[in-house]
Image (cartoon, grey):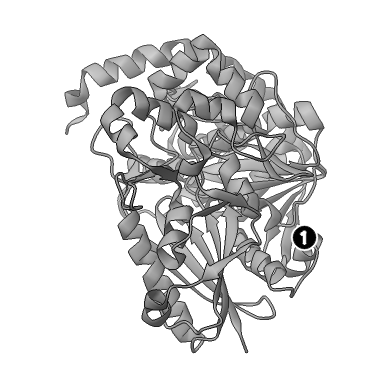
Amino acid sequence: MNYIIGMDVGTTATKGVLYDENGSQIFEMCIPYPLIQDEIGQAEEDPEVIFDAVQQIIYKLSQKANGKILAISWSSQMHSLIGLDENKKLLTNSITWADNRAEETVAKAKATGLAQIIYLHTGIPIHPMAPVYKLLWLKENNHQLYKKAKYWIGIKDYLIYRLTGEVWEDIPMAAGSGMLNLKTLTWDKEILAQLDLDTEQLPKLTNPTQIISWINDEYRQKLNLNSNTVIVLGASDGYLSTIGVAVLNKNNFALNVGTSGAVRTLVNKPVIDKKTRFFCYPANNNSYLIGGPVNNGGIIFEWARKTIFNADETAEDFLNIAQTVPAGSGGLIFHPYLGGERAPIWNADAKGSFVGLTRNHTKPQIARSVIEGIVFNLLGASHAITENIGKPQTIRVTGGFVKSNFVRQMLANVFNLPVTALKNNQSGTLAAMFLARLALGMNHELNEIGNFVKEDKVYFPNDKDVKIYQELIPIYHEVEKEISHSYQKIAAFQTRHPDLFTN
């Protein structure tokens, strides 16, 4: 029996899953690592720490397979940026999607019209997450480093470079840089001119099923790999989390909620929103990933559990007590913007709030309102998409936040659509494995991925709760709009008085 490793390089951890040659999951391993957040807005990672985690995982999985690894294929976090010198040595950490320090740069780009040009050319939302804005920020604020950097790549590019000595990037991942032209699927020369960069400073582009190179002998021996093991380029976690639940067209939406979350689907031509409310990333010439990513998913649930509940109470306790009160939480509305927000409001200054709180509200209503707020926000992230392409027939869900029957049913009630849960929760690594199968000729068409995706249960909307939510959700959005005028002032106050956060 031979095996394939699917790697998923996440924001807070890397996961590796071992699949046999029939596509069955055999074993998985996960190694966490910290974010570097030494200043306000910073969110970086040490690429060497991530590379160490990757090596440990590959070695362990290869041991489980007695070295019989056909391929290692990749899913990775989007929007990371790493600077390398002329010898391809690290000059920077990996600046992640969560880094908001380019916020003022984005505001300037909006004012000059550059941001709108970037969106129209590339489909990238106007937000500091995008590497194009990180580069503009570095150019303005650290010009010496900017000029010293010979190459600019992402975290997956770096990991594969370390293993193979080659720098390549797949089209879905490059699309998240804000520098890939939607029409030509090449680096956009007009945008590169704004950055004083040329194409030789960026990775070579190819498709996700490209076999990049034989692995360097040093790592082949160190990681217990055989002479036939190949690296398959893979793609972005956004694209792979979508096809990994067999969402291949606009008839279905994929909803993944872990620490953060996203609503996504695939269309057969570019779709650009006049209000720039969602992304549009090419996967190839006839397939485009559109969707809205949210910062505030399971991370908000975890904050609420630790803050509202006692230290010894678990996530299950939180969910159980939330279920003891009816839908709507007695009119208590929670806006979950504790980490700024991307879709649907695209405001890095956004702050969280409880609205409608009275003396009659108790812990169960507060707990339920937190979960409802997260779900309302996900619905909001889908609105712009449905306005442009229509409502889907179903939503297919994965991620740690949506493991409970309670949350899945709430999603069905809030979206007023059937929600399908899947048995395999590792949609990213499963899709990476499938790309390797395509690369190796074991499969031939993308739609064959459906043979590896197993449905668990379908949750249908409950009319009673749907009616409550359809009455409450417009109020949620009305308050969201009204309070947004104060976000920047609150953010400025918090910046002026960081000492007020100390215990």
Name the residue at 75% across, 34% down.
Answer: 270
287 or 429, which lies in front?
287
On-image quarter of the C terminus = top left
Q: Nearer the viewer, residue 312 or 455?
A: 455
- Tag 1: amino acid: Leu
Q: Percent x, y for residue 16?
A: 49, 68
Task: Check disc 1: other Cα within 10 Å, few if <14, some if 14-19, many if 20+.
Answer: some
Viewer can see residue 467 = yes
Q: Where does the image place residue 343, in percent across and percent down from the top left?
A: 57, 30
Residue 323 % position (x, y): 56, 46
Q: Is residue 113 above or below residue 11?
A: above
For the point 42% across and 11% down, the residue is 486
Q: Is residue 92 left or right of residue 296?
A: left
Q: Please tell me which residue is depicted at 36% across the width and 52% down the height of the picture.
A: 88
Q: Quadrant of the N terminus?
A: bottom right
Picture residue at 30% right of the left edge, 24% below the top: 141
Depicted 264 relative to depicted 121: above or below: below
Instruction: Judge whether 25 appears above or below 488 on screen.
Output: below
Q: Is residue 400 left or right of residue 291?
A: left
- Could you tell me which secondary element the residue under label 1 belongs to? helix
Q: Is residue 333 visible?
A: no
The foreground one among 95 and 404 is 95
| Disc 1: which residue | 446
